[in-house]
Amino acid sequence: MKVIRGTRGIKEIRNPVLTLGNFDGLHLGHQRILRKVSERARKLGCPSVVYTFEPHPLKVVSPARSPQLIIGLEDKLELIGSFGIDYVVLARFTKGFASKRPREFVEEVLVKGLGVREVWVGHDYSFGRGKRGTVEYLSRLGEDYGFAVHVIPAYRKGGEIVSSSRVRELIKAGRVREAGILLGRDFTLRGRVVKGRNIGRTLGFPTANLRTRNELIPGSGVYAAYILLDGERYPAVVNIGTAPTFKRRTTAVEVHILDFEGSIYGKDIRVAFVRRIRGERCFKDPVELARRIERDVERARTIFARITASGRLQ
């Protein structure tokens, strides 16, 4: 997959099957669109293209309303590439770009810039100044300019519409297992291990502090998770919060890898969240906290054993 930053390099792409959107989280609904685009492009013998924006449009037009992104750009590109997409166009989103009328955008970018053959979008897609470009209007423009428009209905899982906003709500609430179902994979944080206060080691459970690059992290609590380190996967218990027992003021992500020895300071790791074990609470003293961590570790072992036995978490 080739990534084109900006729109100057798009001239090498001709007559593609294309989809437009932000694709935050790459959830099951997004995945269905990407599969359709990839399959259709192969059938027609033309390039498949994802046209997306950097930064997220709301960060430019209304920063106060801009959501915390579910995944970073690096992970988003990696996931898009896994669906066999040929090109990703990362259009620079500016206030000038936001002021374009829908017809202007279609004519300049999709028609003259790409000579687009087909456009596939989700049911709620909108574009152009003030989001005036609805899917209905896009379909009319397709008729005017000679390209087909396919609108994908809302994707439902367990009777619930899968959306980035819903996934975001679940993660913030600590409901990582439910979020993972809508994402089609475990929610993952990426970051670097940095030195902490070594409190976990004094309790008998050494932890690694994660300095994450993600905007969105799960709500406070204790989680069973897998750590991806140097190509290997390790079971772990992760604490997110302010450690009220020790009156810490800032939120930290602390990782205790089960049955692991060795230093990982300075290493880049990923944390794939499996299930929330409990919420954060204040203990009367470190001894009581250590006892509870023991129980958390045992609970995590039970969860991982069930995954090993069945291949998935029941």
Image (cartoon, grey):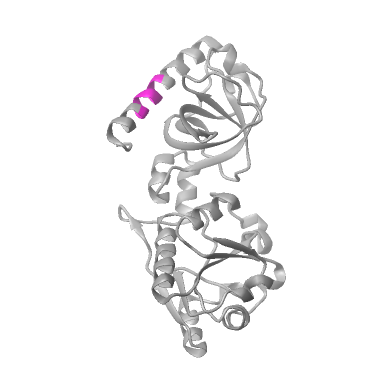
Classify the position of the C terminus by image quarter: top left
Question: Which residue is depicted at the point 63% across and 73% down?
Answer: 10
Q: Is 300 in the magenta?
A: yes
Relative to 128, is 204 above or below? Answer: above
Classify the position of the N terminus by image quarter: bottom right
Question: Which residue is depicted at the point 66% across and 61% down?
Answer: 62
| Count of all numbered marks drawn on residues in the image | 0
Percent x, y for residue 15? 52, 79
Question: Which residue is depicted at the point 57% across and 22% down?
Answer: 207
Relative to 170, is 293 above or below? Answer: above
Q: Residue furthest front?
A: 45
Q: Is 270 in the magenta?
A: no
Query: Can you see residue 246?
Result: yes
Q: Is residue 170 left or right of residue 240?
A: left
Percent x, y for residue 226? 46, 33
Relative to 265, is 55 above or below? Answer: below
Q: Main secondary structure of the magenta part?
A: helix
Query: Can you see residue 285?
Result: no
The magenta span reads 298-304
The answer to which image quadrant residue 97 occupies is: bottom right
Q: Residue furthest bottom?
A: 144
Between 192 and 156, the one lying in front of the other is 192
